[in-house]
Image (cartoon, rainbow, N blue to C red):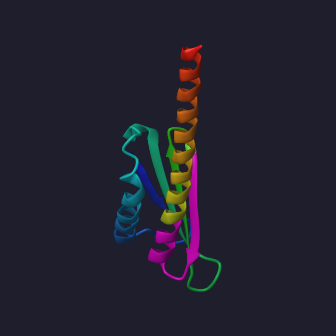
């Protein structure tokens, strides 16, 4: 499962990369039902437009579906945490939608078996 940590306007230090990996583990631990080779993760850490702000963008490609979490805050860590929470919220929504579709499909199959 590749993880890419980049920045357009500042240098990414090893501690920044370690922080991103640590915070992303919250999402990546929930992806046990998806093979690791079908997951690509990209984190972009930038200085924000406002003075002393940071922009964080997380792009997760999970089995061809794209999840994007973004946030801007005054500290890099809080911006990263909020972006992870945004991406996690999107993943949970995607997962519940998939579960509902599977349930409806099984229900239709049972109805066909009864007829």
Q: Is residue 74 above or below residue 44?
A: below
Is residue 23 visible in this depiction of the protein? yes
Q: Is residue 77 above or below residue 41?
A: below
Q: Is residue 111 above or below residue 84?
A: above
Rendered residue at 53%/27% (across/down): 106
Q: Is residue 92 magenta?
A: no
Q: Quadrant of residue 100?
A: top right
Q: Is residue 79 magenta?
A: yes
Task: Please state the horizontal and vertical placement of residue 85, each as a whole percent of the image.
Answer: 50, 65
Task: Please state the horizontal and vertical placement of residue 19, each as a whole percent of the image.
Answer: 37, 68
Task: Please state the horizontal and vertical placement of residue 3, each as a whole percent of the image.
Answer: 41, 52
Q: Nearer the viewer, residue 5 or 103?
A: 103
Rendered residue at 55%/16% (across/down): 114
**Quadrant that contains the N terminus:** top left
Q: Is residue 66 above or below residue 56?
A: above
Rendered residue at 37%/61% (across/down): 21
- The span picked out in magenta is 66-83
């Amino acid at each position: 499962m590749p993880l890419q940590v980049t920045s357009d306007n500042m240098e990414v230090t090893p501690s920044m990369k370690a922080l991103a990996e640590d915070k992303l583990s919250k999402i990546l631990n929930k992806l046990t039902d998806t093979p690791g080779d079908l997951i690509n993760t990209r984190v972009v850490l930038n200085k924000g437009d406002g003075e002393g702000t940071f922009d964080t963008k997380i792009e997760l490609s999970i089995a061809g579906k794209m999840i994007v979490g973004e946030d801007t805050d005054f500290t890099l860590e809080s911006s990263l945490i909020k972006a992870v929470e945004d991406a996690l919220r999107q993943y949970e929504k995607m997962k519940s939608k998939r579960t509902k579709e599977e349930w409806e499909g099984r229900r239709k199959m049972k109805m066909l078996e009864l007829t």
